[in-house]
Structure formats: structure tokens, C-alpha cells
Image (spheres, grey):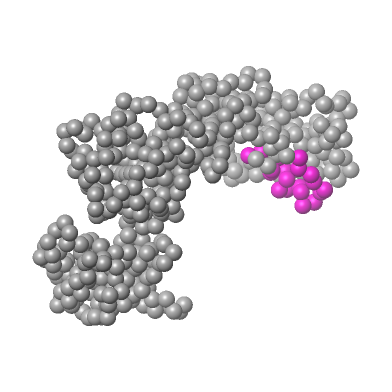
Amino acid sequence: MRAIAEADVIAYHSARHGRSIARSIAAGHLREDHIEERLMYPLTVETTDHPGGYRGALDDFYEEAAARLAAHLDAGRTVAVLAEGDPLFYGSYQHMHKRLADRYDTTVIPGVTSVSAAAARLGEPLCEAEEVLTIVPGTLPEDELTARLAGTDSAVVMKLGRTFPAVRRALERAGRLDDARYVERAFMAGERTERLADVDPSTVPYFSVAVLPSRIDRENPVRETGEVTVVGTGPAGAPWLTPESRGALVNADVLVGYTTYLDRVPVLRPGQVRHGSDNKVESERAEFALDLARRGHKVAVVSGGDPGVFAMATAVLEVACEPEYADVPVRVLPGVTAANAAAAAAGAPLGHDYATISLSDRLKPWDVIAARLRAAAEADLVLALYNPGSRSRTHQVAAARDLLLEVRSPDTPVVVARDVGGPEQSVRVVTLKTLEPSEVDMRTLLLVGSSQTRAVERGDGRTIAWTPRRYG
């Protein structure tokens, strides 16, 4: 109010209809001797024949608008630019600021954003404790909206209007529609708040927002039947989670998994229940998760890497095919598997055809493993060897190496990747003849090259391995 009172010129942006919400808010403080500069956009969302397209037309407008304000400033007049909400938060003023602030003494007075106003009108906490708030424009592509909404705790979607149907679909796909609230023109005439799922899309103006409030202390809904989602955490936890996987973990009532993998999952929200168990009870874990879902819970079964690669997806689906669980929905979400993570850390050794084989003989006999190793080696495939050894399994790596040396060159590159993505990551490239079995444990993955795989020491001293896409 003081800035308006002291200004000679009052400027504000508007669409071509000429009305300005910012001006209407400040109208009671404007004087007859104020010079008003209405900065009218030449277009909003329609098409244009401007040679630079939509962006070019707007850039020309901002240059012209900034020049009009500069003329007043050069004449010694003080200019107050009105901005709804906060000037530097999705505001039109920021385009003036970038063109004028380096030449003229400038003060930006912060305002109350629509985000804060909407939360206040809803009377619900926006975010609490370690919750993450995500603010996104509704103009993002629908798939991007879905991913961001699925992977956050609280959210506000700006710029609704014609984007509302896509935003609603994104919320539904992300499993967050029931939580979503709608706020229109907070603290102004025509204010409206309600459940977003109940809003008629034809009634939604541009100046409205979708809000996902804090979920702390929010009770999980009672359902007749829940669901099981098998989630891959990647090789080392949070940085490797896909947005879809993070969303499934955020939305789950219960997390079930091998304790080591559960520990990789960040604390996503209070109220979730975690059930950890030993890595040797996969079938029991799957049955436990399906029983919880049958009683109405949303269950995430946490798996390392990709759940479909030597992991929990098979165990869950096997039990889910029993008659008593036939009506329980089950989804499997992909994750970054250890072979791909190790290959990326080493270069590109999986650049051509490859085979993935587990050296564990707990679930299949060693003679089957040996036959598959020999067949893959004779086919000249790169080999990704999972579960190479443990405290109780010590002979497999040496046996596999000796078998492969009967078919492969002793100089075949071998990537020894341990704890990829973790604090003790170690990625080395050795040769098949120098592979030392005693240096391999359950946290290690081996990538054995084909006849075409190359290992090259680069200028920084790092050796990279890669397999050409051309063969022969």
C-alpha cells in the first residue's frame, strides 16, 4: 500500500479483455492523479502468425512493455507494477524485472502466493515434518504430471483452466485423486473449494489450483479389496527409484520386504507399517502381502534391483495364482537391475546380445547352471552373472571361470562390480584368467565379455569396457 501511494505510475498486465485481477485488488488505493499503464497481452493461448511463433510474439510484447515503463523511469517517475500473488512466482512481472532491474533501482515486495492462500482456505496443513512439497504447472505433459504427482508427498498444480481434464487424469493415474482438493479464487469474490473429483471441468477457470495436502495423520481409507504392487528399488535405494516406483511406495499403507531392501526405502510418510523378514522366506512374504491386500490394504512388496530379475515378482505372482488370491490386484513395477547399473558404471559392456544367469544353485542344480554357461559362452554372448557367491557358496565363481576358459580367450574382459550405487562401490575391469574368486561375494556382479568386448584405458586412467553393436 505504501509503494502504491508513493508511485507516480501504476502498471499492470491484462489479457485482451482489459480486466486485471491485480488492479481490482488494488483499486481502492489508486488515485485520480495516478498514471495507469495497462500492459495488454497480444495473445494468451491462441495461435499467432508471428514469425517467431508464440514465444516470439510474447518476447516482442515484453520488450515493448519494458520500454514503456523505462520511458516513465527515465522521466523520473516512480513506477509500481501490480502483480497478483507473488511477483516472482509464475508472475508476469518477472519479464519486466529481467529487462529493467539491471538499469533502474528496483525493489520487489513479496506477496502471498496462491499456494499459501489455497492451503489457508482449505484449513489443512500443506506439508509437515520431512514431507516434500512439489509445485507444478498444469501445462506439463500428462505423463510428466503423473510421474511428479505420484512421487511426492504434497503438491500444488497451478494454471488449471483448460488443463484441468489432463490434471485430473494424472491425479487418478497417480493414485492421488481421492486426496486432491480444488481451490478457486482464494480470498476473492467467487471463491470455491471442494473435492477435486467432484469438480465439473467446464467450470474451471485459469485462476484455480489443485492441492494435495499433507498426509500426516490422514487415515488410510477402508477398502473391500486392496492391492499388491511389487516395487524394484534399483541396486542401492532412493536415487535409483523411478517416479512410478516412488509413487507406489508413497501411496502404500504397508511395506513388505527383505529387511535389507526395506532399509533402502526412505521414510516416505508417517502411518505406514513396515514388515521386514529374512531373504529365505519369499513365498511366505508373498502370501503375507496378498493376505493384507485381501483385507483391504494397499501393499508394496519391496524388491532390490528389478523385481522381475531373480527377485520378488515371481514369488508374488506364483502365490497370486492360487485360487484364494485370484481377485487380488497385483502390479509389477520395473526397477534398475544390477546388470544395467554395473554396465553403466563400467562403460557399455552390454551393448550387444547378452545372457543373464544366476550362479546360485539353491533353486536349480549346478549341472543346469554349467550347461547354460557353456551354451551362452559358445554362442559368444556377453554374460551377466548374478549371485556369484556367498559365505556358504564359495566354489561357483572358480567353477564358472574354469568352464568359460575352455571356450573364451583368457584375455576376455570381465567387469567386477561391487555395491554399485552404494557407499562402497567398486568397479574394476580384469581378464578372465586373472579373475580372483576370493574377491567376489553376494554384493558383486560379474559381466563377462564376448569375443568382441573391448577394454580400453582412457586418458584419465580409467579402464572402460564396451561391446560394439556391430558383430564380426
Quadrant where the image shows the C terminus: bottom left
Between residues 392 and 185, which one lies in front from this camera angle? 392
Between residues 190 and 38, which one lies in front from this camera angle? 190
The answer, for residue 18, to whether it is visible in the render is no
* Residue at the (21%, 79%) spot, across then down: 409
Q: Residue 1 sits in which quadrant?
A: top right
- 352 over 463 or under it: above or below: above
Residue 405 image position (x, y, % from top left): 18, 77
Q: Is residue 11 left or right of residue 404?
A: right
Residue 411 image position (x, y, % from top left): 25, 80
Between residues 146 and 11, which one lies in front from this camera angle? 146
Q: Residue 248 sits in which quadrant?
A: top left
Magenta range is: 90-109
Residue 135 image position (x, y, % from top left): 56, 40
* Residue at the (27%, 31%) spot, across then down: 294
Residue 157 image position (x, y, % from top left): 54, 35
